[in-house]
Amino acid sequence: MSDTDNGEPEIGKYDPGLTQRLMSVMRPVLKTYFRAEVRGLDSFPPGGALVVGNHSGGMFPMDVPIFSVHFYEKFGYDRPVYTLSHDILFMGLTGSLFRRTGYIRANRENAAEALRSGGVVVVFPGGDYDAYRPTTAENVIDFNGRKGYVRTAIEAGVPIVPAVSIGGQETQLYLSRGTWLAERLGIKRLLRSDILPLSFGFPFGLSAAIPPNLPLPAKIVTQVLEPIDIAAQFGDDPDVDKVDEHVRSVMQQGLNELAAQRRFPILG
């Protein structure tokens, strides 16, 4: 069991009342500024489920807020949405807020505990590598070879629910992940990051993560795809590589379909 500093399990920090109040504030902003839509929730399975998504939006990713607002609107607050997150999110004064609204440290113990409790766990295997992908590759599913999410779902005995999102990489122009720059400047040793992303946006123009540009009001659409029952499709001893390949293939097809429906950048 993974505990917080005071010995309480991380999933025990979830506060449905606070989460509901936060969602009520965020809902009109997300639905107005980003014209956010989440499609496909009618097929969402009961019980624990691992939502696997592509990550978009650089320093200001809207994937989780948009999914959560629509999920809670449909299913209520008795079924928590937990998001596997980097440790840095829990530093400082905002750490308690994130914990109380369903963010938990990204490790297998937390994921397993949340899934066993019947919660919905959101994971972005590509992490920052995915969130800062160049805008020219915005419609490419790339987890950078990470497959741990498959083992998490297998061990917990829950379905994988793929979810793809479009529009996040249009909130500014992402030029490069800057892996070459991060290596040259020794960023990995200092910040445990392989990237130093370069982007162009408003109001500062060219940015290397700092100063952070504000996200443009791009229309963001998330499509929740059909759940994948791993045991039913791959047997009792599934090959992790094959499951991962299948998940990415399904997600790429779903993202291609969203891209085909999109007429203009930012406008949607």
Image (spheres, helix red, strand yellow):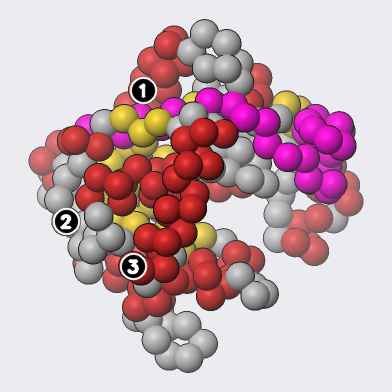
Do the residues bearing badges 2 and 1 touch, measured as CB atoms within 8 Å? no
Kindly identify the residue that appears in the image at 35 percent across and 30 percent down. 223
Q: Could you tell me which secondary element the residue under label 2 belongs to? A: loop
Q: Whole-percent x and y of residue 251?
A: 37, 29
Q: Estimate the spatial distance between the alpha carbons at disc 1 and disc 3, rounded to whole Å.
A: 31 Å
Q: Name the residue beneath numbered marker 1.
A: 254
- Near-viewer residue (90 or 70): 70
Tell me if residue 6 can be seen. yes
Residue at image x 47%, y 42%? 28
Residue wearing tag 2 = 47
Boundaries of the magenta span: 198-227
Left or right of residue 243, residue 169 in this image: right
Q: Is residue 248 left or right of residue 135?
A: left
The picture places residue 80, in percent across and down from the top left corner, at: 30, 61
Kindly report the distance in space between the C-alpha atoms of the residues bearing marks 2 and 3. 17 Å
Find numbered disc 1 in the image and state the secondary structure of the residue it sits on. Answer: helix
Q: Earlier in the sequence, mark 1 or mark 3?
A: 3
Magenta segment includes 28: no
